[in-house]
Image (tube, helix red, strand yellow):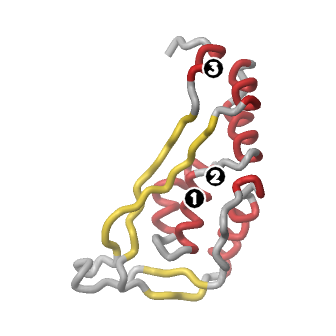
């Protein structure tokens, strides 16, 4: 885009990215977490910086879609967002000014408390709002 990195770093306050996931209908069923899914959730939760200061639900049950008349037997009704917000603080501004790699900027932002889209999605899975399959469908590539 031919924007000087110094100008970009000093003129932007934040960047935001978001995706839509389907919300579970109220007919959702509580299930025990399969071992491989539990491992994936625990790994993601462990990668959340303490600086994020988020409340993490207990990792014991998740929900799956069931289907009813209200949701047209799909198990999902409505949509919700999963998002990440990169706040440009002094450390991030300096990295951008120095033309740091995007992976370096992302690592520093996560260290400073940014939640990635995938982490936000996993938290919504634990809250019973959506499924891990939905989060993987829209945000798994973002995490790699």
Q: Which mark is residue 44?
A: none
Q: Earlier in the sequence, mark 2 or mark 1?
A: 2
Residue at 53%, 67% in the rendered image: 124
Image x and y of residue 47, in percent: 74, 58
Q: Nearer the viewer, mark 2 or mark 3?
A: 3
Q: CA distance from mark 3 to mark 1?
A: 27 Å
According to the picture, the residue beneath numbered tag 3 turns out to be 10
- Horizontal side of residue 50 vs 117, given as left or right: right
- Horizontal side of residue 134 vs 76, given as left or right: right
Q: CA distance from mark 2 to mark 3?
A: 22 Å
Residue at 71%, 49% in the rendered image: 113
Q: Is residue 130 above or below residue 100?
A: below
Depth check: 131 or 8 in front? Answer: 8
Residue at 54%, 74% in the rendered image: 127
CB contact under 8 Å: marks 2 and 1: yes
Image x and y of residue 84, in percent: 56, 48
* Disc 2 secondary structure class: loop
CB contact under 8 Å: marks 3 and 1: no
Q: Quadrant of residue 27?
A: bottom left
* Disc 3 secondary structure class: helix
- Horizontal side of residue 69 vs 15, given as left or right: left
Mark 1 nearby-residue class (10 Å; few <14, some 14–19, many ≥20): many
Residue at 66%, 14% in the rendered image: 6
According to the picture, the residue beneath numbered tag 2 turns out to be 115
Q: Nearer the viewer, mark 3 or mark 1?
A: 3
Q: CA distance from mark 2 to mark 1?
A: 6 Å
Mark 2 nearby-residue class (10 Å; few <14, some 14–19, many ≥20): many
Q: Which mark is residue 120?
A: 1
Q: Is residue 87 above or below residue 111?
A: above
- Horizontal side of residue 39 vs 130, given as left or right: right
CB contact under 8 Å: marks 2 and 3: no
């Amino acid at each position: 885009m031919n924007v000087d990195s110094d100008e970009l770093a000093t003129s932007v306050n934040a960047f935001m990215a978001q995706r839509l996931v389907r919300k579970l209908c109220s007919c959702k069923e509580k299930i025990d977490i399969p071992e491989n899914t539990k491992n994936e959730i625990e790994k993601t939760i462990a990668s959340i910086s303490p600086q994020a200061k988020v409340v993490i639900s207990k990792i014991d049950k998740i929900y799956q879609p069931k289907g009813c008349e209200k949701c047209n037997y799909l198990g999902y009704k409505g949509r919700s967002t999963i998002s990440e917000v990169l706040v440009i603080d002094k450390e991030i501004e300096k990295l951008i000014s120095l033309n740091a790699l995007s992976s370096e900027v992302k690592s520093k932002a996560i260290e400073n408390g940014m939640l990635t889209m995938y982490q936000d999605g996993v938290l919504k899975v634990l809250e019973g709002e959506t499924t891990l399959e939905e989060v993987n469908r829209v945000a798994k590539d973002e995490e790699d």
